[in-house]
C-alpha cells in the first residue's frame, strides 16, 4: 500500500505513521526494520497486544521466507539458534517462571548474537534503565546490542507519567537507533513534544470505506447505535445490549468496558445466563485469558491492535480516541450470513447531545473521527508535565541511578548529566532551576526513582478464587472486591463495581508535596487485616491533598472528614502541576 512504500523512503530520524486501524502498520514497520538491518525494539502499551503482535510478526516473516523463533519458551531454552530472527517477548508475564529471576532470562536472551526484534513495554524498559531487576547490569546488555529501529505503537495510549517517561527514554536512547517510528490511528498533543526533539516525516494514508479499483478494503459497513450512559451506575445497560445482540443475531459478541472490576462483574452476569464467556483483563491470569466464546469481555487490553473476527460489538467510551479505537475492533472482516457489522456504543449524556447535532444518518469512517472529536470529552494527556518542574523531578528520578554511580554530590552530578548528556530540548533550564528548590531534594528523588513507568507500584499478591491462582492486585482495587484471608494471604472471592477506598477520620499534614506516613493516617475503612497491608504499602509514598476530584485514571483516596482527595504516588506530581498551572 502507498503508506507502506512511503515509510521505506523516509530518511528522517522520526517517522510518524498516522494510519487507521487494520491498515497494515505492523507490516510497514517490519519491512522498514528488515531493510535497516533486522534489529529493533517495538514498544506496545499492553501485554495482550505484545502477544498478538509476536504471532503476527512471525506469520509475516514466514511469508517473506525469513525464519524466526519466539522467546522465551516455557523451558527457557536459549542455546544455538538457527533461525534468522529472534522475536523476544519481554514482559513481566513472559519472564516469570523462565529462570531464577526475570533479570537472568533478560540477560541470557539479550546476549544472543542473532538479529532480534524485542517486543516490550515502557514498564520493562524503565525497569531495565533504572537497573531494578534483581542482579542488575541488564542495561549494558541492552545498550551493547546493535539496534536499528525503535517502533512505538498505539502512541495515543500514553499519557501523564507514562507519556513523560516514554519521551525521556526516547531522547536518552536516541543515538542507539537509526530511526524512530511512531504509529497510531488517533494521535494526541504529546506528539508535538516528539516533533520538537527530532526532524520528522508524517505519513497519512487514505482510508477506503468502499471498494475502489484494485485496492484492499480495510473497513466494511457497520450499523452504529449510540446511547447515553451513566458511567458510575453499573454495567446493566452494557449487559442488556450484549444479550440483545446475541439473541437477535446468534453470533459472538465483543464487549469492551473501562473498569477491570466491571469486566469481571459483566462476565459473571453473562455466565449466569448460560453463555460461554471469554475474559481478557488485568484481573484474569494470562493462562486463563480466552478470546473466544458466545461473548468476549475485555478492557483497554483489547481495544488496540487486536484482531477479532467478530461483527457484533458493545462498548463504552468516555472520549473520542477510545471510541475510534474500540469501534475499530468490528467490521474488519466479511463474515457469512449477517456480514454487516453492528456496534452499540455508550457515551456520556453531554456527548450524546452534541453527537445528535453533528452526525448524519450515514457517514464515512474517515469523517466519523472528526465528528467524534468535535462532540466528545477529550481525555487529558498532561503532556505539559514533561516540560515542567515536576517533569524535571520525574526526569531526575529516572536518571537518579546513573547519577548515584558518579562521584561527588548528587545535585552536581544531576546538573552535569542534564546539561551535557540527557536534557531533552523541551525541558527548560528554568524548570530545572525550579526543581532544584525542592527540599530535601535527594530523599524526594530517591522516592521518585522507586516508581514505575506508569506511576507507583502499589500491589499485593492475592489469591483469586475463580481462577485458583495468585496474581498481583493494586491495593486500591481491593476495595472493589469481597475479600478474605487464608493462611495470612489476601483472597479475592468476587468483584464488585464503582467503589473506592476511603480514608476514615485522621490527621494529615497539609503541605505542597508530602509523604504518606502510617502515623499520619491510622484508620482505614477496609476490612480486617487488609488495613495493615494497605497502610504498609502506602507508607513513604508521595501524596497531595486536594479539594478537586482527580482524574479517574489517577490513584487516589477520598477523605470524608477533610472533604478532600488524597492523590497518591507519582500521580501527585501531575495533580500539583495541573493546579499550579490553573489548567484543570
Image (spheres, rainbow, N blue to C red):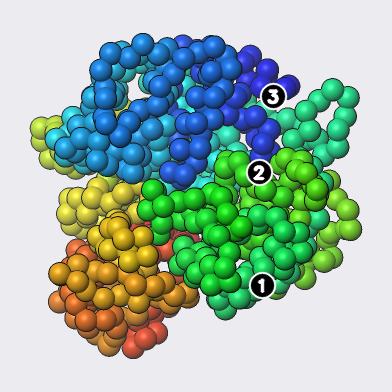
User: Which residue position holds label 3?
Assistant: 3
Q: Is residue 349 visible?
A: yes
Is residue 402 something one can see in this rendering? no
Residue density around tag 3, few if under 14, some if 14–19, many if 20 or more, within 10 Å = some
The residues tagged by marks 3 and 1 sit, at their Cα atoms, a distance apart of 41 Å
Q: Which residue occupies 37% across, 86% down?
A: 560
Residue 516 lies in what quarter of the image? bottom left
Relative height, residue 219 to residue 350 (above, below): above
Residue at the location (76% across, 64% down)? 248
- The spot of residue 519 in percent (x, y) is 15, 77
Identify the residue at image location x=61%, y=30%. Answer: 25
Report helix, strand or loop for mark 2.
Answer: loop
Q: Position of residue 291 (x, y in %)?
A: 54, 49
Pick the residue in front: 518 or 24: 24
Q: Considering only vertical position in the picture, is 132 above or below 484?
A: above
The residue beneath circle 1 is: 240
Mark 2 vs mark 1: which is more N-terminal?
1
Quadrant into which the N terminus falls? top right
Amino acid at each position: 500500500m502507498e503508506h507502506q512504500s512511503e515509510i521505506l523512503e523516509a530518511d528522517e530520524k522520526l517517522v510518524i505513521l498516522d494510519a487507521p486501524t487494520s491498515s497494515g502498520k505492523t507490516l510497514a514497520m517490519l519491512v522498514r526494520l528488515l531493510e535497516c538491518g533486522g534489529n529493533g525494539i517495538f514498544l506496545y502499551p499492553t501485554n495482550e497486544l505484545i502477544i498478538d503482535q509476536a504471532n503476527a510478526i512471525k506469520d509475516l516473516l514466514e511469508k517473506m521466507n525469513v525464519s524466526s523463533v519466539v522467546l522465551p519458551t516455557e523451558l527457557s531454552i536459549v542455546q544455538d539458534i538457527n533461525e534468522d530472527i529472534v522475536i523476544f517477548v519481554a514482559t513481566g508475564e513472559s519472564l516469570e517462571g523462565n529462570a531464577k529471576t526475570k533479570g537472568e532470562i533478560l540477560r541470557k536472551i539479550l546476549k544472543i548474537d542473532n538479529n532480534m526484534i524485542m517486543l516490550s513495554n515502557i514498564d520493562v524498559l524503565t525497569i531495565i534503565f533504572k537497573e531494578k531487576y534483581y542482579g542488575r547490569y541488564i542495561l549494558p546488555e541492552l545498550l551493547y546490542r546493535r539496534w536499528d529501529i525503535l517502533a512505538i505503537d498505539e502512541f495515543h495510549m500514553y499519557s501523564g507519567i507514562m507519556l513523560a517517561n516514554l519521551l525521556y527514554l526516547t531522547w536518552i536512547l536516541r543515538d542507539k537507533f537509526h530511526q524512530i517510528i511512531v504509529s497510531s490511528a488517533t494521535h494526541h498533543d504529546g506528539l508535538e513534544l516528539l516533533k520538537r526533539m527530532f526532524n520528522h516525516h508524517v505519513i497519512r494514508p487514505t482510508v477506503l470505506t468502499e471498494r475502489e479499483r484494485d485496492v484492499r478494503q480495510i473497513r466494511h459497513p457497520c450499523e452504529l447505535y449510540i446511547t447515553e450512559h451513566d458511567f458510575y451506575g453499573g454495567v446493566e445497560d452494557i449487559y442488556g445490549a450484549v444479550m440483545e445482540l446475541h439473541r437477535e443475531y446468534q453470533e459472538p459478541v465483543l464487549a469492551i468496558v473501562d473498569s477491570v472490576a466491571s469486566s469481571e462483574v459483566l462476565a459473571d452476569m453473562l455466565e449466569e445466563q448460560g453463555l460461554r464467556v471469554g475474559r481478557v483483563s488485568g484481573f484474569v491470569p494470562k493462562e486463563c485469558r480466552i478470546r473466544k466464546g458466545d461473548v468476549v469481555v475485555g478492557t483497554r487490553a483489547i481495544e488496540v491492535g487486536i484482531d477479532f473476527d467478530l461483527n457484533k460489538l458493545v462498548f463504552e467510551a468516555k472520549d473520542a480516541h477510545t471510541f475510534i479505537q474500540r469501534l475499530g475492533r468490528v467490521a474488519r472482516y466479511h463474515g457469512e450470513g449477517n456480514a454487516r457489522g453492528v456496534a452499540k456504543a455508550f457515551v456520556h449524556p453531554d456527548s450524546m447531545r452534541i453527537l445528535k447535532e453533528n452526525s448524519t444518518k450515514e457517514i464515512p469512517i474517515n469523517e466519523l473521527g472528526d465528528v467524534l472529536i468535535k462532540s466528545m470529552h477529550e481525555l487529558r494527556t498532561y503532556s505539559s508535565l514533561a516540560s515542567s518542574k515536576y517533569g524535571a523531578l520525574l526526569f531526575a528520578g529516572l536518571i537518579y541511578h546513573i547519577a548515584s554511580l558518579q562521584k561527588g554530590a548528587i545535585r552536581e552530578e544531576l546538573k552535569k548529566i542534564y546539561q551535557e548528556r540527557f536534557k531533552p530540548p523541551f525541558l527548560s533550564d528554568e524548570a530545572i532551576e525550579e526543581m532544584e528548590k525542592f527540599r530535601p531534594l535527594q530523599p524526594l528523588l530517591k522516592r521518585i526513582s522507586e516508581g514505575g513507568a506508569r506511576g507507583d507500584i502499589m500491589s499485593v499478591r492475592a489469591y483469586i478464587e475463580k481462577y485458583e491462582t495468585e496474581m498481583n492486585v493494586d491495593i486500591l482495587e481491593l476495595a472493589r472486591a469481597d475479600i478474605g484471608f487464608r493462611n495470612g494471604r489476601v483472597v479475592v472471592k468476587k468483584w464488585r463495581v464503582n467503589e473506592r477506598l476511603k480514608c476514615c477520620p485522621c490527621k494529615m499534614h497539609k503541605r505542597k508535596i508530602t509523604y504518606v506516613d502510617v502515623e499520619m493516617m491510622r484508620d482505614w475503612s477496609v476490612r480486617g487485616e487488609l488495613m495493615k497491608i494497605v497502610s504498609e504499602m502506602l507508607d513513604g509514598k508521595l501524596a497531595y491533598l486536594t479539594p478537586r476530584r482527580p482524574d479517574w485514571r489517577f490513584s487516589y483516596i477520598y477523605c470524608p472528614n477533610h472533604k478532600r482527595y488524597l492523590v497518591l504516588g507519582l500521580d501527585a506530581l501531575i495533580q500539583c502541576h495541573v493546579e499550579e498551572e490553573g489548567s484543570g
